[in-house]
Amino acid sequence: MFSFFRKKTSNPSQLEPSNSQDDAGLVNSGSTPEGTSTERAQWLSKLRTGLKRTGQSFKAVLNLTTIDEELYEELESALLSSDTGFNAAQYLLAQLKERIRQDGVTDPKAIKALLIEILTALLQPLEKELVLGKHTPTVIMVAGVNGAGKTTSIGKITRHLCDSGVSVLLAAADTFRAAAREQLLTWADRNQVDIISQDSADPAAVSFDAVSAGKARGRDVVLIDTAGRLSTQSHLMEELKKIKRVIQKADESAPHEVILVIDGNTGQNALAQVKAFDESIALTGLVITKLDGTARGGVLAAIALWNLDRTKSGLTTVPVYFIGVGEKLEDLQNFKAAEFAQALIND
């Protein structure tokens, strides 16, 4: 496995993993900081397969023999079809044209490497590991629309944390859907962790009880599964705001992470979700799921460009902590900008 999160603590015994840890404090779920070469190859292969449809579009364009307006137009179409959106497509094309001019590039075959480099640079600020240990417990509030893979992602993250010796308490605050509650109960049983769950209870009350219990029981992490929300329904978003306010009554510094889970198949709607949820509950990170065959993936460029505009306004970046390419536990891993860019451009 790859390093999945980072600990931050001045106490060497706190959050000490049961397996390897490098000097920078990376906590790993495998025997080496980057996992075995076989595991890495399998992960990259799944990522490339998941983004294969988009990669084929770029491959066809980059096989053209002349750098001219036709090539740029075809490349723009490929970017748009990959769900980058108009603004991100124009940004990437402008950067590419400038690099071609600066470097005096005349061979179309050189464009692929340049495009990967430019896309990697745009995506790089999104690459960040989840930090644990500054607060005990670290309270993580997880949001997302129904069907995005929110509860499953929580279960997978819990397993990775437990495998690294981190104690986790789950909170089933998605009380409006019995199926979500049952699903989280299953993950709690599978991972052998405690869960705070009340049938038909108020989501904010469950969240408050979970944070209080996490503090009392000395848990390292409290993961709160909030009810699935449509970002266009204001009364539902108000419920999320309430949950956040109530969590702060149990711990004034919490929640320490507010993570949004996004279905990678939703295209530009994913960016709209990020903006809406961020406006309501101030996101600190993202999880992109279901990049496993039908997703086009280019929306990450749109999210990266949105983040770039945020930083120009003095706001912090909302990074992508994890991406998922399948149903298995190991299919949810840290986001790496260079790997993603290479897979998207079919390198």
Image: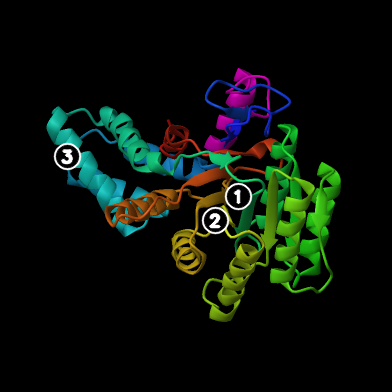
> Which type of secondary structure does the marked residue at label 1 adopt?
loop
Q: How many marks?
A: 3
In the displayed structure, would residue 83 be above or below residue 64? below
Residue receiving disc 2: 265
Looking at the image, residue 90 sits to the left or right of residue 52; the answer is left
Distance in Å between CA atoms under marks 3 and 1: 34 Å
> Which type of secondary structure does the marked residue at label 3 adopt?
helix
Between 315 and 214, which is closer to the camera in this rendering? 214
Q: Quadrant of the C terminus?
A: top left
Q: Say if mark 1 contacts mark 2, CB within 8 Å.
A: yes
Q: Could you say where residue 64 lies in the image, as x and y percent from the top left?
A: 28, 36
The disc labelled 2 sits on which kind of residue?
Asn
Tell me the residue at 39%/39% (across/down).
124
Q: Could you say where residue 121 lies in the image, as x and y percent from the top left?
A: 33, 37
Looking at the image, residue 308 sits to the left or right of residue 163; the answer is left
In the displayed structure, would residue 224 be above or below residue 7? below
Residue receiving disc 1: 290
> Which type of secondary structure does the marked residue at label 2 adopt?
loop
Where does the magenta region start and end? 28-48
Between 229 and 118, which is closer to the camera in this rendering? 229
The disc labelled 3 sits on which kind of residue?
Glu
Between 107 and 123, which is closer to the camera in this rendering? 123
Residue receiving disc 3: 98
What's the image's color scheme? rainbow
Label 1 or label 2, whichever comes before in sequence order: 2
Distance in Å between CA atoms under marks 3 and 2: 31 Å
